[in-house]
Amino acid sequence: MKYIFCAFLFLAPNLCLSQNFIRGVVQDSLNSPVFAASVQITESNSGKVISYTSTDSKGKFELPFKNSGNYLLEVNHLSFQRYKRDVQLKPEINIDLKIMLRESYALLDEVIVKSTATAKQSGDTISYNLKALTTGNEQKLKDVIKRLPGLEINDDGKITTNGKVINDLMVNGKKIFGDNHQMATENINAEMLEGIDLLNNYESFSAIKEIEGSDKTALNIKIKKEYLGKITGNADGYGAHKERYKAHSNLFRFGTKANVTAIVDLNNTGEQALSLKDYISMSKSIKEDLKNNDAALSSFINLPSIPDFLVQNNNVETKRSEFASFDFAYNATSKIAVNGFSIFDFTKSNEKILSNKSIFRLGQPITTTDSQSAINHFFFNQTKVNIDYKPNQNTLLNYSIIFDPSEAERGRNTNTEMISDSISNSEINDRFNYTLGHQLSYIIRIAKNKLLSFNAFQEFKQQDDDYTLQSSEGVYGQSFTNLSQNKNIFKFETGLFAKYTQKIKNHILRLNSGFFTINNRFSIENSLNNSFANQIKTNLDYSFFDASIMRKIGLFQYRFKAEFRNSIISSGGERKEIFQFLPTAQFKMAFSQTHNLTLSYNRTLDFPKIEQLNEFSYASDFRNLVLPSQLSYSEVFNQDIFSVNYFKFDLYSGTVLMANSSITEADQSFTTNTNNRLYFNEIQNMISPKYFTWNSSIGFEQRISSLNSKFKLNANHIYSDNYNHINNLQNRSKTNIYTIKGSLNSNFKSPLFNYEAGLFYSLQKSIYTLFNSDNEIKRLTPLLNFNGRIDNKFRYYINNAYEIFKANGSKRYFYDLGVKLIYNKDGSKFKYWMEGVNILNMNNPEIIEISSNNNTFSVDVISRLSGYVGFGLSYQF
């Protein structure tokens, strides 16, 4: 709490700058609302604009102000005469106005509207001024978003605002690609964009927003009229030396009733349409689709096993990717809307790693050198359909279904040099997973201020893992050298619950109750145990009731919630009943729509995953053997989470300040005990006495008008303090991870030249008390990129990055230079380009990566994809 207190003192000066508002409604002579009228306040003497917005669909507006004095209020609309009015602003006094505009019948030869604002705000909507924020040399949607204040594309390809991933991505008001933002950001051409709106407090069903409000955000991409109602997009072909190739096509048809998108990508250049984080995100539970339910839904079902090689990215010798996706959104009538997508991804890669490991144990560490080569195959599909039915403005029926099968096969050969011995191991791991889930949500407004919601869902998860191991020595100290193993996990979850909401003046009351049942089965077949087949089952049934009250308007906002949960968990004929109280509290100071401070606390509850309850031994890989668990099926893991969040966005200066800090504490958590044998490790699941993390980040953006540039800074710090056991002795692990990323991006209106200069720095320091040892890992990456346009026909892009890796005396340097030159004649549908990627490393380069966990420190020399140079041709539809 002391860190939160310090952060509060740091931000305290901003709390004193409370704001008042001028609110009003703009109407015509027939008392009809006037939409999109510009409203601004200027200083009477200097004419300086101090606040600016536009009216919403109901003609309403809201303007914040800080200082008292005499000002001029001005309202403009192309169809009406200009409205001016002197206003006297005083502190602690809000002004409500009703303004009538008179129609203008004068013929205007030309209208020029000039604005220095980076964005304008209308209610909960922030509309970005793309002309003021872009240079015209952006290629894709992602290039535009990176220039917009308050928006980021994180390392996972997700669009974020205020440090959080947006809930919905839409094109012309229709959802697109689910949570796969990268599909849109890397395929929609920048020239197609009419505008971009950030929708705060977003909710597609008006009854929910009017009674409950919303904490969701959405980003709406507006497409220019000339691209509507017809097929648009590109078909690209690229060839380079050493048989490198890339074929890509994206086709769009955006209309008033339907949006349809198809994307196909084939390449062996290392570009991967589906990343590890995409795979994890798409593997989330169907419970995330439930409408209007904020219950603390169980996370008891774990994600499917993650293919190891998805972590590798381009740290492989070769990679071939085949990807296809189809996305649609169709508003059949004003009552029925359907959207969905289907994604297919095939990836094959070869990897080569030389790994030097220090395995900690009492006395001297065990030092090994592993030479590894592997071939990986991966297939993934996800198909999802969502249906909204609104028979009237007070009722919503929503149904969604999802199916995602995947298969990963990995063949790995490892030669290990240890002391005076040399051991070879050959592994084949074939994993097949699938998830099938569907949910039904029904929401009805039973009165002007009352809402009822009903939800039901079912979800099936199957994980099947076949593993074979052949070794030159006895497997895990046994007499046999071959091992065959099948691991199977099956999970079925169903739930039914209801929520009642009532708005009482400025407060919202919620009552929520429901029931869940979760069945789990985990089985192993191998020759390591006394019996050939081993199986464990657990069942969890729990009912809950929660009540919350909140205030979501005004300067001081808050939310209090209390959940009472009664869980009955059983396994092997045993049964245990557990009652829990889970509180939540949140305090928010909303100085304006784009300036707030939030403090929050909540408690979470979970039980061990069934994978952690094994009563039998099984192989994890050639070096790690999992022994029978010490965990009880009825162990309870509680976490207390404290957080503070600060956000300020000045629409006119383009200044953005974000600060987040959170602390997570637990009295006990899941950990392992590792017994380090000479040739392998024995791992046993057990309870840790303590767990603590502190995660802080700060982000700052500032437009520098004198340089026509924007400065961005992001800094993060993660501190973790936890326990594990090595050879049955307690080991306390403390880790600090620091990352800093700063950049200066130009916004020159001259198309000839623009630049991005930046620096990325990371430092990881780990301390292990059992061995009185510490490890330090550093990475430094300066970059300098250029782009521009010559004679409106040629575009050029030059990217430079120099990576420096350091770890306990080990160093490795890597210079990445990329060049792209595009020729595109005005009016031509064809585009030609020459592109070189990593051109200073035309043979497979090597980089160094360092990893550290509770018992092993590893320095890995990894072969990375080589650079290439080639030519491409593109046709625009």
Image (cartoon, rainbow, N blue to C red):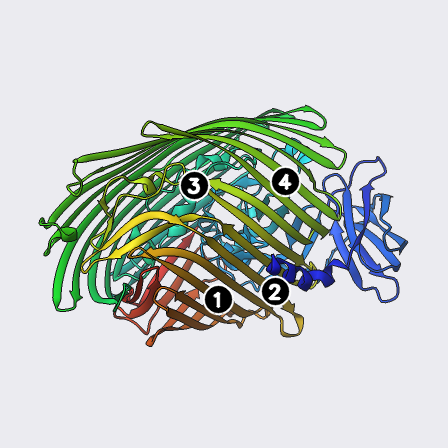
Q: Position of residue 68 (x, y in %)?
A: 87, 59
Q: CA distance from mark 2 to mark 1?
A: 20 Å
Kind of residue at disc 1: Tyr
Mark closer to the chain start, 2 or 1: 2
Task: Look at the numbered discs 1 and 3 and tell me whether their residues touch, using CB distance below 8 Å.
Answer: no
Label 4, secondary structure: give it: loop
Q: CA distance from mark 2 to mark 4?
A: 26 Å
Label 4: which residue? 214
Label 3: which residue? 284
Q: Position of residue 631 (x, y in %)?
A: 35, 42
Q: How many marks?
A: 4
Q: Is residue 425 above or below residue 178?
A: below
Mark closer to the chain start, 2 or 3: 3
Q: CA distance from mark 1 to mark 4?
A: 34 Å
Label 2: which residue? 701
Mark closer to the chain start, 1 or 4: 4
- Residue 104 versus residue 468: which sits nearer the camera? 468
Query: Neighbour class for label 4 at 10 Å: few (<14), some, many (≥20)?
Result: some
Q: Is residue 877 left or right of residue 267?
A: right
Label 2, secondary structure: give it: strand
Kind of residue at disc 2: Glu
The residue depicted at 37 percent of the width and 66 percent of the height is 835
